[in-house]
Image (cartoon, grey):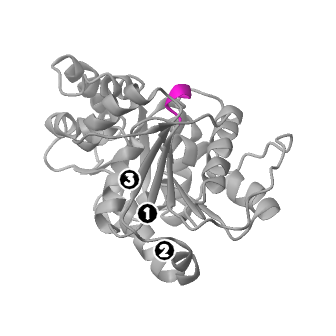
Amino acid sequence: MWGCGKFTFPHFRIRPSVHSLPMHSPIGIFDSGYGGLTIFEKIREQLPGYDYLYLGDNARAPYGTRSFETVYGFTREAVFYLFDRGCPLVILACNTASAKALRNIQQYDLPRTDPSRRVLGVIRPTVEMVDRLSYSKHVGILGTTGTVASRSYTLEIAKLFPHITVRSEACPMWVPLVENGEYASPGADYFVEKHISRLLEQDERIDVVILGCTHYPLLIDKIRRFLPESITVFPQGAQVAASLKDYLRRHPDMDRRLTKHGRSRFLTTETVRNFADTASVFLNRAVEAEQVVIG
């Protein structure tokens, strides 16, 4: 469930998890940067009564160009940190982490520590919608260099819908544009148009484009401007939230473990001021955070 790709690094030491949960047991949401806030916001909209603990590894971002081994190590540290802060369920609100670390954590780490905990990603819920959205059965993926290189979307779609043709385009400048507040600037037009053109040159029959990075919803107006109106743009947030809601309905034991006071807290490995300034762009409101060390 919600996994993709396996990449095992047995030399990482397994750290025992905390089995006795504290009174506060939020849903953990992790991202390497800030884009996961777009996933968090959609989850909170659909599940407003739950408690949330968001962790951004902003000091070590971006993950997109890092190796599988490095992303796995960083993601694993973050997941176990959230476990130790009381989260029985963690969502990897990051395509790179989902692509390069999720399956290894699910299949290697959790069975050896605490199988009652769960880690879910964003790629599988997104892929599950593809067949319903596409009429031509030709789909495009826009993502980071790491996500595209992992071929996670291509492989997951092939498993579920082998009749669908997938083309991918890496957009290495899009995340920096968003995180530096340039996503609405005229200067961003060049990079958005460039990569959309490259994607469509690969396959003129594409009728659905998946935004395979959680930063990209902030560029959605420009993306739509440079795509034909006949092509559906599919951001992930609402679908990931709907999948989580359905998951908790189907797993009442996990649902009962989660506390429900409607509280949200934010953690960052970056300075609190830097996090608050950038996070407010994603959430359109002021954000208070706590600086933590997870490495």
Judged from the image, the secondary structure of the residue bearing numbered disc 1 is: loop
Comes first in the chain, label 3 or label 1: 3
Residue 242 visible? The answer is yes
Q: Which residue is mark 3?
A: 40
Q: Which residue is mark 1?
A: 51
- Calculate the distance from the C-alpha at mark 3 to the C-alpha at mark 1: 11 Å
Q: Nearer the viewer, residue 34 or 137?
A: 34
Where residue 158 appears, as percent x and y from the top left, is 53, 58
Residue type for callout 3: Phe
Q: How many marks?
A: 3
Where residue 94 appears, as percent x and y from the top left, is 48, 45
Q: Nearer the viewer, mark 3 or mark 2?
A: 3
Where residue 239 appears, as percent x and y from the top left, is 35, 62
Q: Is residue 265 left or right of residue 136?
A: right
Question: Residue at the front extreme?
Answer: 23
Judged from the image, the secondary structure of the residue bearing numbered disc 3 is: helix
Residue 212 visible? The answer is no
The quadrant the C terminus occupies is: top right
**Which range of residues does the magenta coloring cover?**
57-61
Residue pictured at 37% horizontal, 23% vertical: 176
Q: Nearer the viewer, residue 291 or 187?
A: 291
Q: Are marks 3 and 1 in contact (CB under 8 Å)?
A: no
Comes first in the chain, label 1 or label 2: 1
Asked if residue 241 is positioned above or below residue 294 in the image, the reply reads below
Comes first in the chain, label 3 or label 2: 3
Q: Nearer the viewer, mark 3 or mark 1?
A: 1
Residue pictured at 48% horizontal, 74% vertical: 247
Judged from the image, the secondary structure of the residue bearing numbered disc 2 is: helix
Q: Which residue is mark 2?
A: 247
Residue type for callout 1: Asp
